[in-house]
Image (cartoon, rainbow, N blue to C red):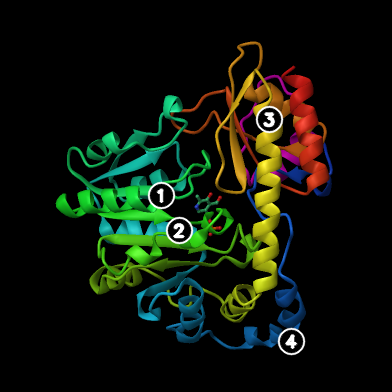
């Protein structure tokens, strides 16, 4: 038993296993936000025959890979940049824009602020409000660009709130950004989990808005964080050149180069994953909505944010109780604007979701 409760991130699995003295393989990763269906069947079947691609360098310009992505997201391949995970592209995009001042819609994934800090940019947070169920309201748009903000950064749907900015609101944000001469970075890491990617993705807006960069990845929906692959869509040639200018050559390895198309072409896996998450999302939301001690915010991604409103309970204690049963949830108190009354977890296999819900209900009676 620990004296002082440590706060862990979704990827802190080795440390958690050591501290709690549990077998790492027995931990159910409710904090990692990765699709529980595992790797695509198409990828597993065809990848072994492609292993010898390691003996050659990838195409320096990744033309074939970018053409596959272009078909997948329905946008010209010239507008696509590939990278070593969304993480590399967050960093490169921020470096390319080099904003003196930037605004992050919060609570938010911590790497945006870390990347801004690396280049000495000042960052301010625009809060999604609890009283608005963590949904951005139109009257907040002016605040996003007050002062000298040259870059707005947001995640859609957002981690950790699982809430969404719809297309109409995104257009209003982009129009305001154009007026203010500012760039907008939209991280769509979780977009494929939403009820309708076509309606919610901002990629179709890239052609019109040169000040927009949309980021996507494969780590979460395609359950491939170890392959390290992400991509950016931007129609401004100069901005793309600036992003590429600080990228190392061959940043995407040959296995990702030939493996990613196998993921994207597996329509059966995509449909199955999407249907599965929709079903579990509804199940979990309905189950937890019944609890009087808890507020759950309507989720659009593959995870849900919950708020405990009874001071007898805390997210740190709940984490402790859950991890002893092998369920690793995310205590959200390290996110800006949240505290030790918030926790987040992603949807795993149905029986494990049931087990976690039972544990939460027993604690928050
Ligand atoms: C919002 C968000 N963006 C980006 C990433 C990192 O993605 P990648 O593995 O593609 O670098 C994460 C990982 O948790 C995330 O939550």
The residue at which mark 2 appears reads as: 199
Image position, residue 302 (x, y; %): 62, 48
Instruction: Tell me the quarter of the picture where residue 298 sits.
Output: top right
Q: Quadrant of the N terminus?
A: top right
Give the spatial CA distance, label 3 vs label 4: 45 Å
Magenta part of the protein: which range? 1-20
Residue drawn at x 49%, y 76% is 69
- Which residue occupies the foreground of this view, 319 or 190? 190
In terms of sequence position, does the residue under pointer 1 or pointer 2 come before the other?
A: 1
Task: Report the disc number at residue 288.
Answer: 3
Residue, x 76% and y 38% (percent of image)? 327
Q: Which percent across, then down, holds residue 204?
A: 37, 66
Name the chief secondary structure element in magenta.
loop
- In the image, taking residue 142 as reference, residue 5 lies left or right, namely right
The quadrant where residue 103 appears: top left
Asked if marks 1 and 2 touch (Cβ < 8 Å), the reply is yes
Q: Find residue 164 and report its horizontal and vertical position in percent.
A: 46, 45
Of circles 4 and 2, the one toward us is 2
User: Which residue is under mark 4?
Assistant: 49
Q: N-terminal of the two: label 2 or label 3?
A: 2
Q: Nearer the viewer, mark 2 or mark 3?
A: 2
Write down the residue under mark 1: 166
**Mark 4 sits near ligand 1, with its Cβ under 8 Å away:** no
Between disc 4 and disc 2, whose residue precedes? Answer: 4
């Amino acid at each position: 038993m620990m004296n002082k409760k440590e706060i862990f991130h979704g990827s802190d699995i080795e440390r958690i296993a050591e501290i709690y003295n549990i077998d790492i393989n027995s931990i159910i990763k409710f904090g990692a936000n990765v699709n529980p269906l595992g790797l695509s069947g198409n990828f597993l079947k065809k990848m072994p025959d492609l292993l010898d691609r390691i003996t050659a360098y990838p195409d320096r310009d990744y033309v074939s890979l970018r053409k596959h992505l272009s078909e997948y997201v329905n946008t010209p391949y010239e507008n696509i940049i590939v990278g070593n995970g969304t993480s590399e592209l967050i960093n490169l995009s921020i470096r390319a824009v080099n904003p003196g001042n930037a605004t992050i819609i919060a609570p938010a994934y911590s790497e945006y602020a870390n990347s801004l800090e690396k280049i000495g940019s000042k960052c301010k947070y625009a809060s999604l409000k609890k009283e608005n169920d963590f949904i951005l309201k139109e009257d907040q748009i002016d605040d996003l660009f007050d002062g000298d903000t040259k870059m707005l950064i947001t995640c859609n749907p957002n981690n950790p709130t699982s809430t969404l900015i719809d297309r109409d609101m995104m257009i209003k944000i982009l129009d305001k950004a154009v007026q203010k001469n500012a760039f907008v970075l939209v991280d769509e890491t979780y977009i494929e989990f939403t009820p309708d990617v076509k309606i919610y993705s901002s990629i179709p807006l890239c052609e019109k808005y040169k000040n927009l960069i949309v980021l996507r990845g494969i780590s979460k929906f395609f359950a491939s964080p170890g392959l390290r692959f992400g991509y950016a869509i931007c129609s401004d040639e100069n901005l793309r050149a600036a992003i590429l200018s600080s990228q190392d050559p061959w940043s995407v390895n040959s296995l990702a180069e030939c493996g990613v198309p196998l993921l994207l072409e597996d329509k059966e896996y995509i449909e199955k994953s999407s249907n599965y998450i929709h079903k579990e999302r509804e199940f979990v939301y309905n189950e937890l909505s019944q609890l009087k001690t808890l507020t759950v915010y309507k989720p659009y991604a593959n995870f849900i944010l919950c708020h405990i409103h009874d001071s007898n309970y805390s997210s740190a204690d709940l984490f402790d109780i859950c991890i002893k049963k092998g369920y690793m949830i995310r205590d959200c108190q390290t996110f800006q604007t949240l505290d030790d009354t918030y926790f987040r977890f992603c949807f795993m296999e149905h029986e494990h979701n049931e087990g976690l819900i039972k544990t939460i209900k027993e604690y928050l009676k």
